[in-house]
Amino acid sequence: MADNNVGLCIFSSGLQSGFHFDLKEVKLFASEIKEVKIIWELADGKTIKSDKLTEQIKSLSIDKVIIAGDYPGEVKTLFNHAAVKCGIKEENVLLADFSVYAHLNGKSTQMAKMLLMSLIKGYDPETFFVPEEVEVNTATLVIGGGIAGIQASLEIANGGNKVYLLEKTGTIGGHMAMFDKTFPTLDCAACILTPKMVEVGQHQNIEILTYSELIGLSGSAGNYMAKIHKKARRVNLATCIGCGTCTEKCPAKSSSEFDSGTSLRKAIYIPFPQAVPNKYLIDAEHCTYVQSGKCRVCEKVCPVPDCINLDEKDTEIEIEIGNIVVATGFKLFDSTRTSQFGYGKFPNVLTSLELERLINAAGPTGGNITFRTQDKKGNQIFEQGSGEPKSVAIIHCVGSRDENYNKYCSKVCCMYSLKLAHLVKEKLPEAKVFEYYIDMRAFGKGYEEFYQRIKAEGINIIRGRTATVQEKNGHLLLRSEDILNERIIEQEVDMVVLAAGLEPHEDSGKIAELLGLQTTSDGWFSERNFVFDPVGTFTGGITVAGVCQGPKDIPDTVAQASAAAAKVLQSIVKSKISKGVKSLSFSEIQAQIG
Amino acid sequence: MKYRVDANLKTELKKFGSKDWNECYHCGNCTAVCPLTENNFLFPRKSIRQAQMGLKTKLASNLDPWLCYFCGDCSKTCPRNANPGEIMMTLRRYMTSVYDWTGLSKKFYTSKTWEIAFIAVMFIAIIAVFGVFLPPARDIISNASKYIDPVSGGVLINSLVPGLEGHQFVKIIEIGDLSMAGIVAALLISNIFRMFYFTIIRDKSVRVPFYTYFTQAWQLLFNFISQPKFSKCDNKQYWFGHFLLMSGYVIMFTVIVALLPKFQVEEVFPWYNWQRILGYYATFGLLFFIIYSIIGRIRRNEIKFKFSHASDWLFLIMLGLTTVTGILIHFFRIGGLPVATYIIYVIHLAVLVPMILIEVPFSKWSHLAYRPFAVYFSKLKKAAYKLQTQQSELSTAA
């Protein structure tokens, strides 16, 4: 082994459609390394004769064979045979599987080169992720106050460590707080979430930073300094008693984010009654005083002196932390993009999240499913008593599994659609409910059973996604192919619900840039290893949890959040942290290997 | 009924155009957006399914590809970018080869060499025939004025071959024309019988009531002339463009085959004469469509132009050459250029004959028969399905 003569095979299977490696560049790179004596280029259907291979290995006195490419294992047998014939041990036939880096935007070729270089020089590429001993700051920053952030914060804080929970909006809770029930158990979402929110709010180790955003990060793994922009809340968190007098008198209105736009809220508001912190805040964009300099009604009616400070300015703070958990979650697919379904054009085409709020007893209609109406000022809202639909259709895969929008499956829509169908049937037992699906993906524990249960409840489940929604005689007309019954169906319904897919949060690009995270081409954060390190990233001390890493349901999100917390706690307890490759440039890696 | 699965069908179909037969995941979007699809004739998805599963017999009994006119709405909205419109186009090519008993259609569609070789042989053969048997007079260059009508100044086109009276020359060409039309018609009619066998007789799921063969017969001519189904597509321009081409082509074909003695005459008619007006209309229709299609296929600006099979290009080139040479004959004749007229006249025939012999029975143009017949057959099947449901309703009621 003294010589380290390497025979390199570059193999492309052609199996992976989104294969973004520049194999030519990799070949050029490898040909310049002096240990590499020969390069075989193989592909699916392009192979080499075993005799010829043996002859070449012998004549060049090669003692190590590396098979690189996507799915290099496909040709390993061929090289194993040749190696054994030439007296090379099977351990020295190595695989460099590039496909694990396939999802890295732009950097995949570089990572492939690094992997190849390490193997040629005799290093295990995993050495870059072996934790090093550094003094790890025990405080952790959790970005995003949804269920993932809440779970991760609690796990870390219960382990006795300080947590800063950063949240962009006025309250923690995230999307889960908006849901009515969870599938497949039909638990009341608020009933299981709010105790956790309260626990976070009262935890002595957790400091909630609501209405705040991350704007900068410096330092290195174990000792980061995060710069945080705190938007002016204009209500003193310490003194506000949450009485609600200000909201009653406030003249300015805007659509409610928490109700997914189905109702209106005031400019001084509390996002929802169970919000944590349960304190008011002022939406500067819609506040009459901030916008025009006149009003100050809230200040006048507030019973607590100096509680409301309408001229409060945004501030910036800096915090020192050792680890960061990224849990920025998702945004719902914008259904106006799928114009064929008429969302935004026909008032009674709803998104799933809108229906979720309608069904919720604490929602704008007190749990009644009603038609969309207009208030006096022309705002589109839902109110009690504006008529109930006699038939509801749910269209699956809106914006998901579609090359024109998002290619991926959003994973949760089938199940939440079934749940919504059940809830509609529960609220309106006389109503007909239709589901139009492509494939029913009931993938988890108890999920298939849930699907069968909903089917038995008399919901019309039709295979064949609706192609168009049109308005006819005040009803909505859906045209679809009923694939299993071989016919075209035109169904008139009163309400259409679009099972919109999930997309990365609009800030995830900014966060990725600030933290140096890789994202997939769809914008989800890349984990370090899809199978064995689903929460780690290529940046040391930074973990990901929840939907920001890829679409997933609540149980999976919670599990991943706990896993991320475990990784954080491990680094704190052992005072060891891996630097990751982000801190090393490619030339540094080259220098390290020699 | 049992159906055999042919695992190689997809590989075979790839030669006819569409490359990817696995993209479709059967969401039903294409069938539902299509304004032409109806119960019992669900396309394109069902045809894609049959192709994916290798159901050759079922595919052969399927009329759906001929009921699609490729507006591209399905491809525009397909969530898999599977291009169902192009798949239907590919299936039409495949169907043409299935109906054709000579096997030449398959050869021409799947091998450029075969197609080009056939055209080349025919081209040379026709030039040779004219060169050997119908050579122009020796003094055509030195004594050009002898071959020009002194009154109109036009070339006496039928009198360029020595030893033949004008009407004799036309007779020879007419015999050639009619025998070509005869061969083409015989091939096409025999293939239509095969189509009938595959789609109606062999499809045991339908029993067509006998009287419908007569009651629905009007569909044939009606659909041949006006393509009413095509006009139901959302984009009406396509129907109009096709109508221009179709009417131009039908007029030209009728004039050169059935009315040749009236069309190819020595006299140069004034511009407002019916022969000239018909000729100009047909030329305009052909030229418009050719230019539009060539630009479209180069720019790939519309769904139906995104993918071009070799046969699409060859067809456009042949038709383009035929039209251009036809126009040149006209101008050379009026301009009084006997040599140029005769050379271009021979080239015109040498391009036209192989084009008709390939395109009409074996290739793209066979749809002039298959489409109206498919509509006719679909009406027969529809009547049969209607009767079946009535009978089953009766039996359940009883």
Image: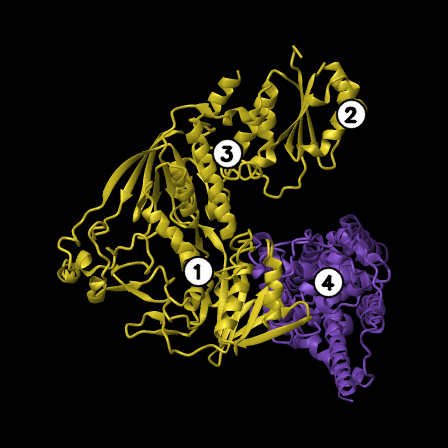
Chain colours: A yellow, B purple
Asked whether the residues under marks 4 and 2 belong to the same chain, the reply is no
Asked whether the residues under marks 2 and 3 belong to the same chain, the reply is yes
Secondary element at image label 3: loop
Amino acid, disc 1 = Phe
Q: x, y percentage for residue B95?
A: 77, 62
Q: Which quadrant, please, contains the C terminus of chain B?
A: bottom right
Q: Is residue A63 visible?
A: yes
Q: x, y percentage for residue A443?
A: 60, 54
Asked whether the residues under marks 2 and 1 belong to the same chain, the reply is yes
Q: Residues within 10 Å of mark 4 (few under 14, many from 20)?
A: many
Chain name for mark 3: A
Secondary element at image label 1: loop
Q: Nearer the viewer, residue B73 or A71?
A: A71
* Residue hosting label 1: A179
Amino acid, disc 2 = His
Q: Nearer the viewer, residue B72 or A15?
A: A15
The earlier-in-sequence mark between 2 and 3 is 2
Image height check: is B99 above or below B277? above
* Residue hosting label 3: A107
- Real-space Cα separation, disc 3 to disc 1, in angstroms: 38 Å
* Residue hosting label 4: B92
- Real-space Cα separation, disc 1 to disc 4, in angstroms: 50 Å
Q: Is residue B241 visible?
A: no
Asked whether the residues under marks 3 and 4 belong to the same chain, the reply is no
Seen in the image, is A252 located left or right of residue A548? left
Q: Nearer the viewer, mark 1 or mark 4?
A: 1
Mark identifier at residue A11:
none
* Residue hosting label 2: A81
Chain name for mark 4: B
Q: Residues within 10 Å of mark 3 (few under 14, many from 20)?
A: some
